[in-house]
Image (cartoon, grey):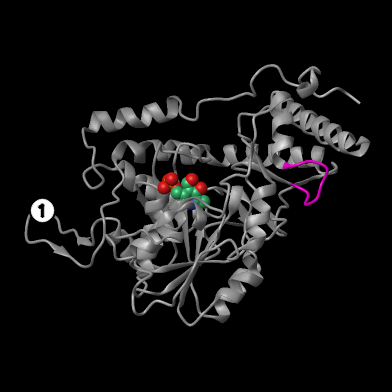
Amino acid sequence: MERLALNGGTPVRRTPLTTGQKWGWAELQEILEVFEAGRYGRFSGTKVAAFEQAAAEFFGVRHAIASTSGTASIHVALGMLNPEPGDEIITAPITDLGSVVPILYQQAIPVFADSDPETFCLDPADVERKVTPRTRAILVVHLFGNPCDLGAILEIAQRHHLPVIEDCSQAHGAEYQGKLCGTLGDIGCFSLQESKHMTTGEGGLTITDDEAWGERGRLFMDKGRTRQPGWGRRTYLFLAPNYRMMELQGAIGLAQLRKLPDIVARRHANGTRLTELIGDLPGLRPQRVTAGGKHTYWHYALAVEPEGPYTAEEFCTALRAEGIPCAPYYIGQPIFLCADSVCRKVTFGSSQLPFSLPTARPIEYTEETCPVTMDLLRRMVTLPLTEFWTNQDVEDVAAAVRKVALGLAARRGSK
Ligand SMILES: Cc1ncc(COP(=O)(O)O)c(C=O)c1O
C-alpha cells in the first residue's frame, strides 16, 4: 500500500489542477460592440434583448428574462406566480440562500422537504408529505448539476395543481429524460454568477413557455412598469424591484451561451469519467446520477458512508495532502439553519413577516425538519470539477481519491 502524503508519502499531484479563463476574445468582441454603440442600459441597447432571444431559442421556450443575479431570477419566477402572503413554497434544504430570499420577499413561507441520501436532491416522498392546503408552488434545486427526480415531482405537482419552479443555477445544460432542465417544470431559473457553467460575472435568467407568466415576469424585472415609446405619463402595475441586466452583461451572455454546449459536454465527460474511476471504493459514494438524468457537474460531490472507515474531514485532509483541492460538508448545515432570516425569523424590522402573518401556518425550522439532510451534509465532500480539467487531471484526481480511500480504510482495518 502506497504511503499517504499525509504520512510523509509522495503526493499524487504536485502542480495545481488545470484552470482557465471563462471569458476570452469572443466576449471582448461583444463588449466592444456595446462601447461602439454607446448604449449601456437594458432598454436602450440591443445586447440584453439579443441574449434573451438567444436563450429562449436555446431552451425552446417563448420567454427568457435576463436579470441581475440568480436570486433575482428566482424572485422574477415568484413574481410571475404572485403568491398570496402566507402561501407556502416547498423547496430544498441544500442550496444557496438565493433560492429562499425571494420567497420571503414575496411574503411567502419556505417549507423544506428532505433530501435523497443518494442523489442529494429533493426526496419526492417528503415533498408530498410537506404539501398543505397553503402550498402554492414547488421550487426544486438541481443540486451540483444533478437533475431532481422530476418524473415523481411533476406527478405530485400535477396531482396537487402546483406549478414547479426549477432552480438550475448549478445545472446549466443538465437534462432529464432528454429535455433540458429548466424546461420540464413551469419556470426555470439560472444564476450567471462567476462560478457557474456560463457566467456574466453576476446575472440571472428566468425562462418559461407560459405567455401570461412571461409577460408578468418581464414587468416584474422592471418595477412593474409598462413601457410606452417616448416620454409621458408612467404606469407601474404592481410592486416589483429593478432587476434590469446591463448591456455589458448581455453582450457577455451572448458569447457565453455559444460556449455553453462545449462547457457542458466537458464537465459531463469529466464527471462521468471520474465516477467510472472511483465508484467502487470503500467508504465512499459519489452523488448518484438521478435515473433518466444527465448531470453537468457544477461541483463533483461525494458522501462518505455512514459508520464508514473515515469521516469527511479525515478524507479531505488526506486528499488535500495529495494535492487535490476539496472541502467537507458543502454548506455545513441545511440552508434554513445557516440563515437567521429563516430559523430566527429576522426579517423586516421587528415584524418577523411573513411568518407572523395571521394567514400563515405556524412553522419552526429545526434540526428535525430535514434529518436526512443533517446527516448527509456531515458526510458530504465536494471537489471543484471544471471544464478546464484535462484527462490527466481527472486521472490524477481519481488516483488520489483511490489512494486516500484505500489508505484510510486499511488504517481503520489495521486498528
Ligand atoms: C442553487 C442556487 N440557487 C441560487 C443561487 C443564487 O444565485 P446568485 O448568487 O447569482 O444570486 C445560487 C448561487 O450560488 C445557487 O447555487
Percent coordinates x, y for residue 174 in the rendering: 60, 51
Residue 234 falls left or right of residue 318: left
Q: How many marks?
A: 1
State the extent of the magenta-drawn residues as a range: 304-311
Farthest left residue?
232
Question: Residue 298's image quarter?
Answer: top right
Residue 176 among those drawn in magenta: no
Residue 308 lies in the magenta stretch: yes
Q: Does the closest atom of ligand 1 sit within 8 Å of the Cβ of label 1?
A: no
Name the amino acid type tagged 1: Gly
Tell whether 147 sits left or right of 138. Answer: right
**Does residue 270 lie above or below 293 as drawn?**
above
Mark 1: secondary structure:
loop
Picture residue at 23% right of the left edge, 48% below the top: 43
Instruction: Classify mark 1: residues with Cα within 10 Å, few (<14), some (14-19) or many (20+).
Output: few
Left or right position of 103 against 349: right
One can see residue 196 in this view: yes
Q: Which residue is mark 1?
A: 230
Determine the main secondary structure of the stretch shown in magenta: loop
Residue 393 shown left or right of residue 404 in the figure: left
Rendering coords of residue 263 (x, y %): 58, 37
Query: Depth check: 158 or 331 in front?
Result: 331
Give residue 292's position: percent from left, percent from top. Answer: 70, 59
Residue toward you, 333 or 287 = 333
Q: Quadrant of residue 408?
A: top right
* Residue 270 x, y percent position in the rendering: 69, 36
At 63% from the left and 57% from the top, the residue drawn is 373
Residue drawn 76% across the image and 24% down it: 6
What is the quadrant of the C terminus in the image?
top right
Q: Quadrant of the N terminus?
A: top right
Q: Is residue 54 visible?
A: no
